[in-house]
């Protein structure tokens, strides 16, 4: 348990530093904001992510791993009633959870109540690795409950759940980063994995672009379900129109955004 948890923390810390540095050294879009604005924005995004993480630790001690561990020897759940090679069970679980996160992401755009929380993520006026941390604590809890219900329903393996969380965290920091892979490599990678170029479209303020490219790790869900969009690969505009609270870098306004009517 500890080794995988330490691996998760290592991937998170290492990925955060790596992708921030790549975005600064080889930026896809040059950040022309003042140093003061950059510091405020970085701080707001980091604190928003930290507050969500802290809230889940307080509300759900042990997290998803412990929940899955408690079901390990029960007779409850789908995977406790079928026999699969362990590696294949982990692979199936990771693919299944990624599909579930894709579905949750789509619903976060389609259901007004969920969008109230998710729009905080889209309100970031710039697009870089810290954007991957800018999720309202309310949305973090909703996502935790959603994934927890899947663990209960299917009795998902604890190690598979933790491996997926590592992949999800690392890939989110990667595909929100402010750099691009070389074009000849990017065209190949995006066929399977969500790249920054692929996901950058999703953060456009234009609704037709925002409602596309929902994938977080596997990109093929968007092609399978017809939500892929390749028409704005060089998108330079981010944030939301007419959403001052959601688009703010003021931490208090970020926290209040889901409860404000516009």
Image (spheres, rainbow, N blue to C red):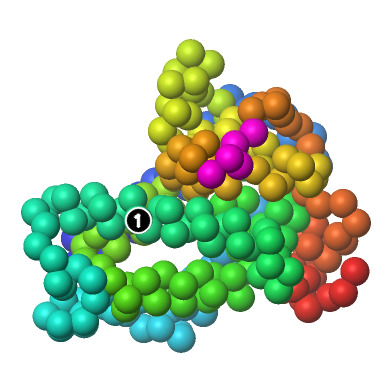
* Residue sitting at x 24%, y 50%: 91
Q: Is residue 226 magenta?
A: yes
* Residue sitting at x 24%, y 76%: 77
Q: Which residues are drawn in magenta?
A: 225-229
Specify whether residue 60 is in view. yes
Q: Position of residue 168 (x, y in %)?
A: 42, 52
Query: Residue 129, relative to residue 155: is it above or below?
Result: above
Q: Which residue is situated farthest in the top direction here?
A: 184
Q: Position of residue 22 (x, y in %)?
A: 52, 32
Query: Residue 128, relative to residue 87: is it above or below?
Result: above
Residue 121 lies in quadrant:
bottom right
Frontmost residue, 130 versus 113: 113
Residue that carries the numbered disc 1 in the rendered image: 96
Q: Position of residue 59 (x, y in %)?
A: 46, 86
Label 1 packing within 10 angstroms: few (<14), some (14-19), many (20+): some
Residue 160 lies in quadrant:
bottom left
Left or right, 88 with reference to 150: left
């Amino acid at each position: 348990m500890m080794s995988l948890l330490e691996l998760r923390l290592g991937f998170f810390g290492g990925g955060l530093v790596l992708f921030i540095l790549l975005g600064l050294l080889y930026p896809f879009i040059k950040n022309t904001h003042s140093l003061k604005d950059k510091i405020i924005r970085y701080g707001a995004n980091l604190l928003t992510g930290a507050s969500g993480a802290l809230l889940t630790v307080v509300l759900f001690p042990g997290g998803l791993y412990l929940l899955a561990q408690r079901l390990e020897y029960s007779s409850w759940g789908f995977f406790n009633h079928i026999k699969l090679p362990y590696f294949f069970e982990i692979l199936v679980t990771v693919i299944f959870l990624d599909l579930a996160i894709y579905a949750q992401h789509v619903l976060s755009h389609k259901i007004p109540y969920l969008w109230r929380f998710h729009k905080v993520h889209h309100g970031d006026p710039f697009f870089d690795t810290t954007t991957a941390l800018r999720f309202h604590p309310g949305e973090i809890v909703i996502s935790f409950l959603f994934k927890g219900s899947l663990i209960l329903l299917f009795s998902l393996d604890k190690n598979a759940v933790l491996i997926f969380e590592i992949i999800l965290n690392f890939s989110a920091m990667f595909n929100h980063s402010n750099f691009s892979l070389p074009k000849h490599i990017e065209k190949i990678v995006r066929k399977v994995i969500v790249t920054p170029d692929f996901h950058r479209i999703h953060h456009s303020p234009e609704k037709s672009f925002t409602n596309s490219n929902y994938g977080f790790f596997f990109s093929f869900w968007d092609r399978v379900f017809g939500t892929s969009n390749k028409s704005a690969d060089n998108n330079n505009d981010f944030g939301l129109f007419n959403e001052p609270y959601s688009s703010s870098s003021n931490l208090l306004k970020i926290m209040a955004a889901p409860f404000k009517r516009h």
